[in-house]
Image (cartoon, coloured by chain):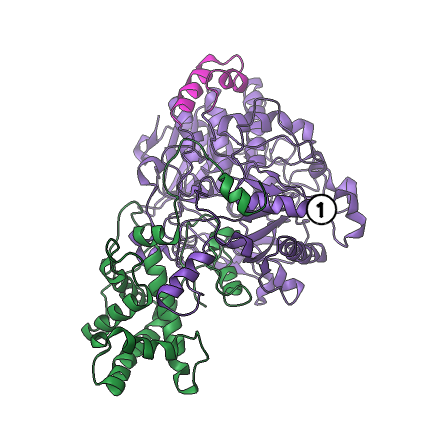
Chain colours: A green, B purple
C-alpha cells in the first residue's frame, strides 16, 4: 500500500486514490482530496526507528528534510539522484527556472526513504538499489558515473527503464525503481512554488470574491 | 471565568458540560448566554486556531510533503491534533475477529473536538428524516418533528454562518429569508456535471456549508438569536465582528485563523467565555457521572491527564457531549447501587443502536478538463452537491432511504499524486503532467443507515486504558439496505462518469467492498437514543435521560436515526433546544 501524501488534507482519501490511479485512470494526476474521508488510517510508524512526526507537531512552521530523522542516502546515491531528478524534470525556461535539484527535490527523496514509516521504509531498498544500479549501468555502458554522462547517454539508460516503450525482461526490476523514483521526484517537485507554477496551479492566494470559472473555461467545456 | 487550571475550580457549578465540540460548544454557548454558570471539561489540550492554524503552508514546507500517518490521518496540516482512529494509551476493542464487524472510532483529543477539522457540510434534516419509521416501518420515529427543530436550525445557521440556497426540493428544507449566506459560484467542473446529469434527473444545487461567504449580519442577527437578552446580543454582535469572511484560499480542514469557518473554538467558545459564565478545564478526561441519594446526577469524576490524579467536580446538572461513543462509555462506567448497569440505563439501551453514515465512492478522470484555461478553483471546499432525488422511487430501489452525493473537482493544490502516473520523463513527461493536472474527479455518497440491534458498543470486560478506565468494545453489522445502497451509489457515479465522458476507476467486486468501513465517515451517532417511550429509549425529546432528568446527552448520542444529511448541524440545533429547555427547567426549580 502506497499512501499518497496529502494534497490539501480536507477529507482526503488515499486508498481510493491508489485504487484508481493504478488502474483505468492511469495518467490522471488525481488529487485525492476530491473524495471523502480517508479510508486508510495513514502510514504506520516503525517502532523504535526514529523520531516520528507525532500526534501534536507544531503545524505552522517550515520543516526541512533531516530535521526530524537523519537522511541516509550515501554521497554517491545522492549524486546519482540529483542527475536523475534533473533528467526527469528539466526546467521549461532554463534562463529563469531553477533545476529541480536546486529546489532540493533530492533532499525530499532522501527524507522520504529515510523516514521511520512502513511505506517509506518499503521504498528505501527500491530507491537505493536503483540508484546504485544506475551508476553501475553507466559504468558498464559508458565507463562513467551516471552524473558524468551526457544527455543522450543518460537517455539511453532511462529509455530502457522508464516504461514509455515496452521494457525488456532484463530491465523489469529497474522499471519499478524508475516508476517509484519518478513518483517521489514529481511529488517533491510539484509541491514547491516553482512546481506549482509549472503545472498551472494558481490557488492559495487570498481574494475578496470567488470569481468562479472564466468565460474561456466555460467555453472550453461547452458551458458558455 | 476563562480557560482555567484545577486550582481555580469553583466548589459547584450550575452545569458541567463534558466535551467541547459541536454539542458541547453549543450547550455551553446557550447556557452561559442565559446566565448559567458552566464548567466545560475537555479531555484534550487547549487549542487556539487563531495562532496554531497552518493557513498557507504548502506541502514542501511539511514533513514528507504532508503525508498521512497514523498520528495525523488526514495529513500533516489537518487541524486535528492528538486524535485519530488510534489514540495512544486509549485503546478500544472489537467483539469479533471478523473485520467486517469492526468499527473504527475517531477521537480527537483537543479543545473543539471534531469541529476543528470537519467538512463543514451543514444540511438540515427534513420532515421525513424525523419520521422514518412512519414512512417505511424501519428504525424509529423521533419524538419530535421537523417543525420542532426548525427554529433551532434557523438560529444555528445564523450563529455559525452557513452559505447555501433555498431550492424548494422535497425533504430538503429551505431556510427563512436572510438566514443563509450567499453560496459561492460553482466551479467549472461542477457546472459541467450539472449540465450533463440533468437528463438523468439529478439536481446539482448549492451545498450548505458553515463558512462565511460574506460577513455575518451583526446588526440584525443578534436580536433574532437572543430576543430580550441585551447582554447576549451585545456579546454575539462583537463576536460576529471578530470573524472575517472567507478569502477563497487555504483548506478548511486545517482550521481557520481568520474565523471564517465554524469551529467550536472560534465561534461557540469565545462568546461563551465573554459572558464570564464559563470555565474550561482541559486535559480533564471524564470517567463517570456521580449520583446523589435522590438518583440525580451530582457531578463528574475525571482524570487530570497531566498528573494522572482522579478528581471530582460538582454541579446541579450534567450535559454529556463527549461524542456518542465516549458519552456511552462514561454512562456505562457510571455504576452505582442505584444504577448497576450504568447511569440512566434502565432501558438497557445505552450504547445500543450506534450508527455511522453509509459511504460509497468512485474516482476517475475527465478528459474534457484537459487544457482547461487556468484560473483559481480553490476556496471553501465543495460548492455544490446532489441531494437525494429518488424519493418517488423508494419502492423500486430494493433498499430503504437514500443518499446525497458530494463531489470534488478542480485544479487544487498539487500533492504527491501530481504527476505520478504519467509515462516517460523529461519535457514530454512534464507536458503530460500539465495536461492531466486538474482532470481528476471524485464522487462520494453519503447515505442513511438504519439503526439495528447488532451495531452497538459495550464495556470490554478486561481491557482498560492507561488510567484504568474500562474501554469500549464494538459490534457492527450492516443490513442489506446499507449494502445495496452503497452499490447503488457506485452505479450512479459510474453513470455520471459516462454522462460527462469521464473514465471511472474500477467498480467494487461485491457489495461488501462498495461500502466504506464502519466509522470511516465519522458520523457516529446513537447509543443513547431519544424516544417517546422510556422503556424503548434513553432520553426524552429534550435530550434528558428518562432515569436521570438532570443528565442530558447533547451530542449525537440521542439520534434515533441518521439521515443522509451530515449530523453536525442537527447536533447543534438539538443541543440549543435541549439547553433552552434545561434553562427553563432550572428556572422553574424542576431539576
Could one spot residue B316 in this view of the protein? no
Q: Is residue B541 above or below residue A56?
A: above
Question: Farthest residue toward the left?
Answer: A75
Q: Chain of mark 1?
A: B
- Residue A174: x and y, percent? 37, 79
Vertical order, B344 against B64 (above or below): above
Q: Nearer the viewer, residue B460 or B507?
A: B507
Residue B184 image position (x, y, % from top left): 51, 34
Magenta span: predominant SS is: helix
| Residue B229 colored in magenta in the image | yes
Name the image quarter holding the C terminus of chain B.
Answer: top right
Q: Which residue is mark 1?
A: B199
Residue lying at 66% horizontally and 66% vertically, measured from the top left = B510
Q: Which quarter of the figure has residue B145?
A: top right
Residue closest to the eye, A216 or B66: A216
Q: Which residues make up the magenta segment?
A: B216-243
Amino acid at each position: 500500500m502506497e499512501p499518497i501524501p496529502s494534497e490539501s488534507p480536507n477529507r482526503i482519501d488515499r486508498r481510493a486514490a491508489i485504487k484508481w490511479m493504478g488502474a483505468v485512470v492511469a495518467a490522471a494526476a488525481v488529487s485525492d482530496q476530491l473524495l471523502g474521508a480517508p479510508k486508510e488510517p495513514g502510514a504506520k510508524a516503525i517502532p523504535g526507528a526514529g523520531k516520528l512526526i507525532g500526534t501534536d507537531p507544531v503545524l505552522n512552521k517550515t520543516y526541512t528534510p533531516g530535521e526530524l530523522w537523519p537522511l541516509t542516502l550515501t554521497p554517491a546515491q545522492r549524486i546519482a539522484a540529483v542527475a536523475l531528478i534533473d533528467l526527469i524534470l528539466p526546467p521549461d525556461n532554463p534562463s529563469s527556472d531553477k533545476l529541480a535539484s536546486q529546489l532540493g527535490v533530492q533532499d525530499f527523496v532522501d527524507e522520504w526513504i529515510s523516514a521511520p514509516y512502513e511505506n517509506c521504509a518499503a521504498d528505501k531498498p527500491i530507491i537505493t538499489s536503483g540508484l546504485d544500479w544506475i551508476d553501475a549501468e553507466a559504468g558498464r555502458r559508458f565507463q562513467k558515473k551516471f552524473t558524468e554522462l551526457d544527455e543522450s547517454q543518460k537517455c539511453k539508460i532511462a529509455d530502457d527503464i522508464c516504461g514509455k516503450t515496452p521494457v525488456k525482461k532484463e530491465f523489469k526490476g529497474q522499471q519499478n525503481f524508475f516508476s517509484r523514483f519518478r513518483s517521489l521526484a514529481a511529488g517533491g517537485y510539484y509541491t514547491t512554488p516553482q512546481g506549482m507554477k509549472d503545472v498551472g496551479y494558481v490557488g492559495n492566494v487570498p481574494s475578496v470574491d470567488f470569481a468562479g470559472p472564466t468565460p474561456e473555461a466555460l467555453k472550453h467545456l461547452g458551458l458558455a | 471565568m476563562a480557560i482555567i487550571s484545577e486550582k481555580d475550580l469553583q466548589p459547584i457549578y450550575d452545569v458541567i458540560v463534558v466535551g467541547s465540540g459541536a454539542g458541547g460548544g453549543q450547550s455551553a454557548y446557550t447556557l452561559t448566554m442565559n446566565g448559567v454558570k458552566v464548567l466545560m471539561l475537555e479531555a484534550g489540550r487547549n487549542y487556539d486556531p487563531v495562532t496554531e492554524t497552518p493557513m498557507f503552508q504548502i506541502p514542501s514546507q511539511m514533513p514528507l510533503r504532508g503525508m498521512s500517518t497514523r498520528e495525523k490521518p488526514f495529513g500533516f496540516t489537518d487541524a486535528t491534533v492528538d486524535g485519530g482512529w488510534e489514540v495512544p494509551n486509549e485503546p478500544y476493542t472489537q467483539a469479533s475477529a471478523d473485520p467486517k464487524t469492526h468499527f473504527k472510532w475517531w477521537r480527537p483529543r483537543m479543545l473543539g473536538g471534531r469541529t476543528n477539522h470537519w467538512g463543514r457540510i451543514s444540511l438540515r434534516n427534513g420532515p421525513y428524516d424525523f419520521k422514518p419509521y412512519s414512512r417505511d416501518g424501519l428504525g424509529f420515529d423521533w419524538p419530535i418533528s421537523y417543525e420542532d427543530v426548525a427554529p433551532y436550525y434557523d438560529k444555528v445557521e445564523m450563529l455559525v454562518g452557513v452559505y447555501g440556497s433555498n431550492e424548494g426540493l422535497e425533504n430538503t428544507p429551505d431556510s427563512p429569508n436572510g438566514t443563509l449566506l450567499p453560496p459561492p459560484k460553482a466551479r467549472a467542473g461542477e457546472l459541467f456535471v450539472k449540465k450533463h446529469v440533468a437528463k438523468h434527473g439529478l439536481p446539482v444545487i448549492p451545498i450548505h456549508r458553515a463558512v462565511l461567504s460574506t460577513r455575518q449580519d451583526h446588526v440584525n442577527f443578534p436580536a433574532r438569536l437572543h430576543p430580550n437578552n441585551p447582554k447576549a446580543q451585545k456579546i454575539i454582535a462583537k463576536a460576529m465582528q471578530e470573524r472575517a469572511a472567507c478569502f477563497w484560499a487555504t483548506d478548511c480542514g486545517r482550521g481557520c485563523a481568520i474565523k471564517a469557518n465554524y469551529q467550536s473554538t472560534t465561534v461557540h467558545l469565545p462568546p461563551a467565555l465573554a459572558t464570564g459564565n464559563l470555565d474550561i478545564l482541559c486535559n480533564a478526561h471524564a470517567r463517570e457521572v456521580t449520583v446523589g441519594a435522590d438518583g440525580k446526577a451530582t457531578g463528574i469524576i475525571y482524570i487530570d491527564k497531566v498528573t494522572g490524579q482522579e478528581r471530582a467536580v460538582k454541579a446541579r446538572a450534567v450535559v454529556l457531549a463527549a461524542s456518542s461513543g465516549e458519552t456511552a462509555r462514561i454512562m456505562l462506567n457510571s455504576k452505582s447501587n442505584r444504577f448497576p448497569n450504568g447511569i440512566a440505563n434502565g432501558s438497557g439501551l445505552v450504547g445500543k443502536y450506534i450508527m455511522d453514515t453509509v459511504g460509497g465512492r468512485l474516482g476517475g478522470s475527465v478528459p474534457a478538463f484537459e487544457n482547461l484555461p487556468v484560473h483559481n478553483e480553490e476556496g471553501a471546499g465543495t460548492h455544490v452537491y446532489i441531494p437525494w432525488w429518488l424519493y418517488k422511487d423508494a419502492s423500486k430501489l430494493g433498499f430503504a432511504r437514500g443518499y446525497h452525493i458530494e463531489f470534488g473537482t478542480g485544479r487544487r493544490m498539487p500533492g504527491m499524486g501530481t504527476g505520478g502516473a504519467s509515462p516517460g520523463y523529461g519535457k514530454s513527461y512534464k507536458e503530460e503532467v500539465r495536461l492531466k493536472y486538474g482532470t481528476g474527479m471524485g464522487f462520494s455518497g453519503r447515505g442513511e443507515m438504519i439503526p439495528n440491534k447488532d451495531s452497538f458498543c459495550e464495556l470490554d470486560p478486561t481491557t482498560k486504558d492507561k488510567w484504568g478506565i474500562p474501554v469500549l468494545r464494538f459490534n457492527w453489522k450492516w443490513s442489506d439496505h446499507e449494502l445495496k445502497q452503497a452499490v447503488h451509489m457506485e452505479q450512479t457515479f459510474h453513470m455520471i462518469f459516462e454522462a460527462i465522458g469521464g473514465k471511472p476507476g474500477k467498480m467494487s467486486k461485491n457489495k461488501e467492498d462498495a461500502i466504506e468501513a464502519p466509522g470511516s465517515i465519522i458520523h457516529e451517532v446513537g447509543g443513547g437514543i431519544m424516544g417517546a417511550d422510556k422503556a424503548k429509549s434513553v432520553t426524552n425529546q429534550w435530550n434528558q435521560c428518562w432515569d436521570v432528568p438532570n443528565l442530558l446527552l447533547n451530542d449525537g448520542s440521542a439520534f434515533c436515526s441518521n439521515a443522509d444529511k451530515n449530523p453536525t448541524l442537527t447536533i447543534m440545533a438539538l443541543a440549543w433546544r435541549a439547553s433552552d429547555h434545561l434553562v427553563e427547567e432550572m428556572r422553574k426549580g424542576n431539576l
